[in-house]
């Protein structure tokens, strides 16, 4: 793949970025290095190697959803710094 100004301009347009001449040259060099690296990987013999679909063999490792009770309102309010007897009282954070 050839890395030219048209490719860099297209990528910068897609990314909604603007680059000056020096930045474009740096990006051109970086893209060439990346493409060269990927082409080197293509030289490896991968016969008999299964494709990697996931990083681990585990799938959907989730805990069991168990219905549990909650603590009574009085117990929760008993440790609150400030209540009105039914609800927690907190400082006002929105000012008009």
Image: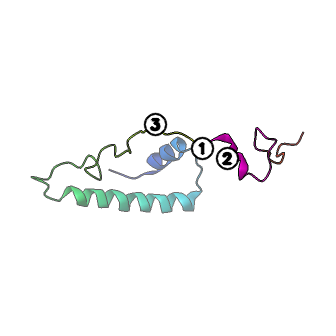
> In this view of the protein, which residue sits in the foreground, 49 or 11?
49
- What is the span of residues highlighted in magenta in the rendered image? 72-88
Disc with the residue nearer the chain's start (3 vs 2) = 3
Describe the colour scheme in one phrase: rainbow
Give the image location of residue 86, x and y in percent: 76, 38
Q: Residue 78 at what x, y percent from top left?
A: 72, 50
Q: Is 87 or 50 nearer to us in this picture?
A: 87
SS state under label 2: helix
Label 1 and label 2: CA atoms lie apart by: 7 Å
Q: Position of residue 58 (x, y in %)?
A: 28, 49
Chief secondary structure of the magenta span? loop
Which of the labelled discs sits on residue 76, or is there none? 2
Give SS at disc 3.
loop
Q: Compared with residue 96, is residue 18 higher up or lower down, i.e. above or below?
A: below
Residue 48 located left or right of residue 13: left
SS assignment at label 1: loop
Q: Is residue 23 left or right of 88 when viewed as pictured?
A: left
Labels 1 & 2 near each other (Cβ < 8 A): yes
- Residue at x 49%, y 62% (from the top left corner): 26
Q: Which mark is residue 67?
A: 3
Residue at horizontal 82%, vertical 41%? 84
Which of pointers 1 and 2 lies earlier in the amino acid sequence?
Answer: 1
Determine which of the numbered discs, if any, sits on residue 3 in the image.
none
Q: Which quadrant does the C terminus fall into?
A: top right
């Amino acid at each position: 793949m050839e890395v030219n100004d048209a490719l860099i301009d297209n990528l910068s347009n897609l990314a909604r970025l603007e680059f000056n001449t020096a930045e474009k040259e740096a990006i051109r060099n970086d893209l060439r290095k990346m493409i060269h690296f990927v082409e080197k990987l293509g030289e490896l013999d991968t016969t008999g190697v299964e494709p990697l679909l996931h990083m681990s063999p585990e799938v959907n490792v989730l805990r069991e959803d168990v219905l549990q009770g909650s603590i009574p309102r009085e117990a929760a309010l008993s440790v609150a710094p400030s209540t009105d007897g039914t609800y927690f009282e907190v400082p006002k954070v929105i000012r008009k």
